[in-house]
Amino acid sequence: MTPHLHRRYPELQRTLPHVRLGTGPTPVRRLEALDTAGADIWLKDDSAFGDGGWGGNKVRKLEWLLPDALRRRRTTIVTVGGLGTNWGLATALYGREHGLKTVLALIDQPVDEHVRAQLERLRASGAELHFTHTKARTILSAPYLLGRHFTGLRPPYFLPAGGSSPVGALGYVEAAMELADQVSTGEIPEPGHIVIPVGSGGTAAGLSLGLRLAGLRTRVVGVVVNDTLRLDEPALARLAGRTERLLRARGARLPENLSPTANLDIVTDYLGPGYGYPMPEAATAQALSEDREHMRLEPVYTAKAMAALLDMNAHGRFDGPVVYLNTNGPR
C-alpha cells in the first residue's frame, strides 16, 4: 500500500524512499473497562505494527530510515540505547533483513526481568554490542565506533537514540495521517488528546507535525519517561521543525505557518526516580491494562504513559475522547 505521505504529496515518491515493514492501519478500539471516570479512552494499538521479529513505534521510523541508509549506500548503522532498548533490537532485526549491520552502544539502566529478556534478544539479533555504560563514555566512544565501521570512504549511518532524526520522525507524520483516515471513516471519533510516552522525542515530534498536516485538532500529550536526554517543548519543536524543513526540501508543498508543535503538551510528573526505574503508579496501570483490557505494557515507557493518562483523566484533564497510543511491540 502506498504510504499516506506519498499519496498526499506525490512529489515525495521520487525524493523520499519508503519500505513497507508493517501492515496498517493499526487497530483502534474503545477501552471501556478503563474509562470509568472522565473522558472516553480509546486505543490505537501500534504494538500490532511490524511484520518482522519486533513491532511497535520503532518499526514505523525504520520504514523511512532503512531506505535512506540504503540510498546513501551505507552498510552499517551505528546507534545508541539503554540495555533494554526496543529501538536497538528493532533496528538490528529489520536492518539485517535489508543487508545492514547494526552496531549498538548500550548505556546502563536498572536491570529487571524486562531488561534481562531484552538483552538476550539483543545478543541473538546479530547486532555488534558495545557496553559503554554512561552517556559520557558513549560520547567518548563515538569516534572509535564510527571510525572502525567505514566502508571504503563511506561512513556508517549514524542514528540518535530511538531513531529520532528528521527522517525517523516521518514514521509518525505518517501515523497521524493514518489516524486522520480512521477518523474520517468513522472507526474512531476525532480525539481531543492523544497520550504517548516520550523516550527520545521522534514519535511526539512527528505526531504533532502530522496531526497539523492532517487537519486534526487533536493535542499530543507527551509523557516524558527519560531523564538522560533533553525532551522539553523547545527540543521537540526543533525536531519537528527540522522534519517540516526536510519535507519541504524534498518537494512537498506544505501549508505556510504550520507551527508544528503548537498542539504539543509535555508532562514530566510520571518519570518516577528516573529512566528505567519502577514506579508504583505505572505498575498499577500495567496490571489494570492487562487484567481489564488484555493489553500488554512494559514498565519503562508504556506503563508510565498509561499511569499518566488514567491520573489525568480522573482529574478531568481531557475534553472529548482521549487516545492511548500503545507503542510496545514484543513478538
Image (cartoon, helix red, strand yellow):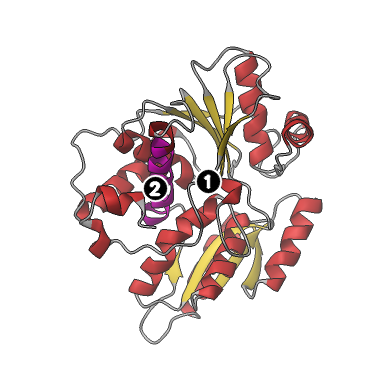
Looking at numbered disc 1 in the image, what kind of residue is underneath it? Thr
Q: Is residue 169 magenta?
A: yes
- Magenta stretch, residue numbers: 165-181
Residue at 64% from the left image edge and 71% from the top image edge: 129
236 displayed left or right of 119 = left
Residue at 75% from the left image edge and 49% from the top image edge: 110
> In the structure shown, which secondary structural element does the residue marked by tag 2 occupy?
helix
Looking at numbered disc 2 in the image, what kind of residue is underneath it? Glu
Compared to 18, does 304 lie above or below? above
**Whole-percent x and y of residue 138?**
57, 62
For the residue pair 218 and 7, the one nearer the viewer reads as: 7
Earlier residue among tags 2 and 1: 1
Residue at 51% from the left image edge and 58% from the top image edge: 22
**Whole-percent x and y of residue 283?**
77, 34
Classify mark 2: residues with Cα within 10 Å, few (<14), some (14-19) or many (20+): many
Residue on which disc 2 sits: 174
Residue on which disc 1 sits: 26
4 displayed left or right of 21 = left
**Whole-percent x and y of residue 73?**
36, 78
